[in-house]
Image: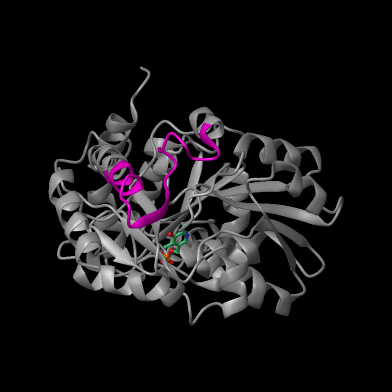
Amino acid sequence: MDVTLETLLLYADADPDEPDLAPPIHQSTPFAAAGVAEFAKMNSDARHERYYRRYGNPSQARLETVLAAAEGAEACLATASGMGAASTIVLGLLASGDHVVAQRSMYGGTLSLLQHLAPRLGIEATLVDQTDTDAFARAARPGTTKLFLLESPSNPLLRVTDIAAVAALARGMGALACVDNTVATPVNQRPLDLGADLVMHSVTKALSGHADVLAGAIIGRRELIDRIWATHLVVGAVISPFDAWLALRGLRTLVMRVERQNRTADAVARFLAGHPAVRGVNYPGLPDHPQRELVKRQMTGHGGLLSVELGGGADAAERFIDTLQLPVRAPSLGGVRSLVVRPAAMWAHEMTADELAATGIAPGLVRLAVGLEPEQDLIADLEHALTAG
Ligand SMILES: *Cc1c(COP(=O)(O)O)cnc(C)c1O
């Protein structure tokens, strides 16, 4: 049976022998062995689900089954956060002397990992303009570049990377391509189908979807995930069983929520783009997005994240944010309530002013993560705040 994403999210982990429709939460840290022979086996099995929770856990395994199915992959490793996933990928796949090609526009934490932590371990990163596909090839160092770390659309500028082209480049030089698919979600984009080796997620965002989980995921071929797990075991960015349970609960409704956010963000982006107080809107669904053809080729929907630049800089942006009544002034994205932040203020402690400028984040940029409010309510609120400002 050719199963839809909606049905996979509901049934991929179903166990015909289990009467519970809501799965249990396995909170135990160690599990008992029946005897010394079983103990020896539990202790030596990779990713044992019932040995000691840092190795794995039944609640975690269940979430991993559904996440792997959602991205069309063999295997998944759930982690304690999206940054736990990114750090474990870098530590698991790279060694001193290796080189990474990544993007100037990426999530601030990932940039901080590549610019501040990786160099201390002898791992060098080159950041390129992701909209210039040839720049990835120019930055690559044959034999030394081991990883292309991509994020598309990027947070918060919604720039797009040609995933198929960069994945082919990576394959041609024996390197790996990993795509942070947090902003798009598997509803709108399937990086593994485009040729990427790995997908990572901040499960904290739309996948769990209710602003009550901190979690991440690394998804791909079993051989790669097993290799990364060996590092995960010593890094210890382990997801809690309750977070795994909540994430699984959120995933059941992922498609409905993201399709609604796709529609609302599209209407909000069009409204903002037509408003005289707005200088520019970044949203992959706008007809004048500079990478419209690429967006059409690799995305089936455009997601709930957009950013907007107001005429009037940081002061106008802060007045606008303070006047809004519905969107909550909070970081994160992909939840049930809309969230608004000024990225330059949010990342001031993780990145220097120069680094912020280099990623293209203007002081007056406002990021809006659309939730599940009806579009007319959000647009009325935005209109009021733009006029009041
Ligand atoms: C939030 C986010 C992360 C980091 O995830 P956490 O769960 O907060 O650690 C990584 N990448 C992107 C694109 C994000 O939006």
**Where 114 falls versus 89 (above or below)?**
below
- Indicate the quadrant of ligand 1 in the picture: bottom left
Q: Is residue 141 left or right of residue 211?
A: right
Pick the front one: 339 or 319? 319
* Residue 26 shows in this picture: no
Q: Is residue 94 left or right of residue 231?
A: right
Residue at 86%, 50% (x, y): give it.
142
Where residue 249 appears, as percent x and y from the top left, is 22, 50
Horizontal and vertical percent position of residue 17: 22, 37
Relative height, residue 344 to residue 254 (above, below):
below
Magenta stretch: includes residue 273: yes
Q: Magenta stretch: residue 279 in it?
A: yes
- The structure's colour scheme is one colour
Q: Is residue 184 left or right of residue 130?
A: left
Question: What percent of the width, then of the height, locates residue 262?
Answer: 31, 40
What range of the chain is rendered magenta? 268-292
Residue at image location 30% in from the left, 64% down from the top: 340
Q: What is the x, y in percent for residue 170? A: 73, 43
User: Residue at the bottom extreme?
Assistant: 349
Q: Quadrant of the N terminus?
A: top left
Q: Is residue 212 above or below residue 76?
A: below
Residue at (17%, 59%) from the top-left corner?
Answer: 384
Residue 266: in sight, yes or no? yes
Vertical placement of 110 versus 345: above or below?
Answer: above
